[in-house]
Structures are given as structure tokens and as C-alpha cells.
Amino acid sequence: MVERQTALIIITEKKRSDLQEIYNQKFTLLTSAKKNTTQLEYLLRQQEAEAKMIEAYLASLREGSFSGKFLWPTVRGRISSGFGYRNYPRKAFHYGIDIAVPYGSPIFAAANGKVVKVTFGWGGGYGNYLIIYHGGGYSTLYAHCSRIVISNGQSVKAGQVIAYIGSTGFSTGSHLHFEVRINGVAKNPSNYF
């Protein structure tokens, strides 16, 4: 009888220990998820702030003229995320289109223009990105680049290689985030090809 009680006590203590370990693991995961959510919200606010700064800067450019038709900026690829509101990772406005393309593929200037901004690093979530002004208030933005091969102030021709596909900044895989802006306001790029 004593041996049976001792065995039951040992089994009970083992189960209690196992439950405590499971609880600790779940608590750690929950704490980590809350921290990640806070970081994600911060990064999204940074990206939105960067987009507003870009909008204000581009609105100040008014010189030249442009027809409003662009070349497709990659060799191939499909639109993996469209323009407008989306629910990942939270409901937010997506200012361009994402074009899924293999890492390292070339990115082409969508039209003749002048490079007005090149940014390396986080870039408010855009990662390495550049902006080309095409005249008449039209500009294009190319983000998440692995490498940029042109420089600020440089003139470029339509179809010229300007960068390479990457996954820098707030990105979940290799792709080009491509924006069209008119007087600084983001427009659906699909309407301009």
C-alpha cells in the first residue's frame, strides 16, 4: 500500500512538473508574440511616415512632361500583392504593387528620368530603394533592392538596369515593390503599363 501511494505521489509530481513546464513555454511564447507585435506596429508606423515624406517631396517636383505610360520594371514576374488596402500583417494601405521575381534579377527603369533619391538600409521599411522622377509630376519608386547600381542625380533611360531584386527592409521574400506617384500621390501602377 505504501509503495502504491509513493508511486502515485511520484506520478502526480511528474505530471505537475510537466504541466508547469508547458505553462512556462506558453508564457514565453505569448510574451515573445506580444513583443513581436509591438515591433511590427512600430515598423509599420515607420514605413507609413517614410511614405508621407516621399509624397511631400515628390509633390514639390513639377518640371518636365511625361506621357504616363511605363515599361514593366522586371524581366518577368507576377503581381503578388496589389495596390490598395490589404490585411497583412494588419489592415493598411499598400502604396504600390509587389512583383514576385527571383532574388538578384535585374530591375529596369520604367521610363526615362532622373534619379532623385537613393536610400540604403532600412528606408522606413522599403529597405534599399530609389526614386526616379520622369517629369510632369510622375515618379516611380523601386524598393527592397539587393543592390542599386545608379546614383542620386543620374539620368536614366527606359529599360536601363538600375538595381537588382532583393528582400531588404520589411519584406517577406524576394520581390520588387513598385510605386507610381503623380505629384507625390500614390496611384495604382497597373493602370500605367
Image (spheres, rainbow, N blue to C red):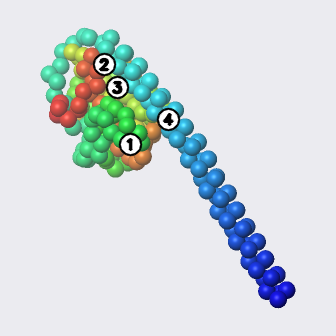
Query: On the image, which quarter does residue 86 sit in?
Result: top left
Question: Helix, strand or loop at disc 3?
Answer: strand
The kind of residue tagged 3 is Ile
- Please name the amino acid that badge 4 sits on: Glu
Which quarter shows the N terminus?
A: bottom right
Which residue has dot 3 on it? Answer: 131
Between discs 1 and 3, the one toward the N terminus: 1
Q: Nearer the viewer, residue 105 or 94?
A: 94
Look at 22% across and 28% down and name the residue there: 111
- The x, y position of residue 114, in whole percent, is 30, 20
Label 4, label 2: how far apart the Cα atoms are: 24 Å
Q: Residues within 10 Å of mark 4 (few under 14, many from 20)?
A: few
What amino acid is labelled 1 in the image? Tyr
Visible in this render: residue 192? yes
Tell me residue 154's x, y (percent).
Answer: 34, 22
Disc on the earlier residue, 4 or 2:
4
Q: What is the CA distance from the residue labelled 1 to the residue labelled 4?
A: 12 Å
Q: Are marks 1 and 2 in contact (CB under 8 Å)?
A: no
Alpha-carbon span between mark 3 and mark 4:
25 Å
Residue 31, image x, y percentages: 62, 47
Please give the residue where the numbered disc 4 appears in the rendered image. Answer: 41
Q: Distance of mark 1 from mark 2, alpha carbons?
A: 24 Å
Left of 74 or right of it: where is 9?
right
Residue 105 vertical position relative to residue 135 in the rendered view, above or below:
below
4 or 2: mark nearer the eye: 4
Q: Which residue is mark 1?
A: 88
Residue 68, horizontal then vertical, whole percent: 17, 24
Q: Residues within 10 Å of mark 3 (few under 14, many from 20)?
A: many
Query: Disc 2 vs disc 3: which is toward the camera?
Result: 2
Distance Cα–Cα, label 2 vs label 3: 11 Å
